[in-house]
Amino acid sequence: ARGVSGGVAGGLRMVDGYSGTVVDRAESWLREQPIGSLLDKKELKGLLVELDGDEDFWTTQKPKFDDIWKQIDSHLRQEERPLDVILRKGMLASIAEGVEGVPIPEDILKAFMRTKAVESLAGAILYTGILEFMQRADVLGNVVNSLPVIGPVRKQVNAALKEALDQTLGGQIKDFLGTQSRPAVEQMITFILSPDNKKGFGRSGRRAAEYVLSRPVNKLLPSLETSDGLRDQVWSSIRQSAGTLSDEDTFLDSFFEQMNDRTLGEFLPDIPPTAKRGMLVVWQKFLDSESGMGLSSSSPQRRRERDFE
């Protein structure tokens, strides 16, 4: 079922029956292909090495990447609506429920909590709490107030004793906390991972997600300077990825060992009909163009068209 209508004279107009068959067959063929039959390890490594060494390519792509980043960043900075307004109705609740139900990975939590920064934070919190307790309890003040001294002298003695306490006990407290920060962090890890507390932390995660989704998009963005730094870091990672992968024979060996016989269809998502129609619109515009006319009128192309009819 093929016909010609509209477009440039001589161009091929693909009606739904014909064009749908083309897309469906192409999709079916791709899904049936084993990954190893499409590209073997040697070919992939050769392509990665060539890509990594093509400095002209990377030099020309960097300005394009920067421009795309700038356009997206500029658009987001003008967006004053919150995400819970932009997203489809009901998606907010779905995201919040998803965050609430996500379990905390134990290994990642331990790796994060056992860092020097977190241990220092725990020590600082304990130190502040101890000093705050001593100041509120005012043990020294109560002792001085019970002495038979007049008001002004009592205030001077009280201030001097507190200063001496900070100088003498402050160092001792810090030394003590230096040995207690790690055990305190371990207790925090145990507390977070406790089954009795999982629901509480899940609800906290949900509230955090709802807060983020309720804020205007432009308020969620970092400063321009930070955004530029992040852009350069992302580009650097992309630039290094080709060289890193081409040097990692172990990774490539493992990849092809596991994926060689698996078909592409195991990883490709289903293509919705609307997406197929969009692809056909673009393809039709190409066939109607001057560049596509020669392709659609060639003899091999005509034979392939008859095969699909």
Image: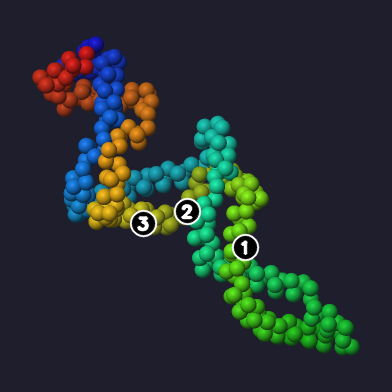
* Residue sitting nearer the eye, 96 or 31: 31
Nearer the camera: disc 3 or disc 2: 3
Residue 180 % position (x, y): 61, 72
Q: Give above or below for 288 relative to 241.
A: above
Which image quadrant is residue 160 in? bottom right
Amino acid residing under circle 1: Gln
Decide if residue 133 is on the left or right side of residue 178. right
Q: Which residue is mark 3?
A: 233
From this viewpoint, is residue 181 visible?
yes
Decide if residue 268 is on the left or right side of residue 291. right
Q: Quadrant of the N terminus?
A: top left
Label 1 sits on a secondary structure element that is helix
- Tags 1 and 3 touching, CB below 8 Å: no
Q: Which residue is mark 1?
A: 187
* Residue sitting nearer the eye, 290 or 264: 264
Circle 1 crowding by C-alpha within 10 Å: few under 14, some 14–19, many from 20: few
- Label 1 or label 3, whichever comes before in sequence order: 1
Amino acid residing under circle 3: Gln
- Label 1 or label 2, whichever comes before in sequence order: 1
Label 2 sits on a secondary structure element that is loop
Q: Give above or below for 298 relative to 197.
A: above
The residue shown at (26%, 35%) is 34
Which image quadrant is residue 282 in? top left
Residue 225 % position (x, y): 42, 57
Q: Which residue is mark 2?
A: 222
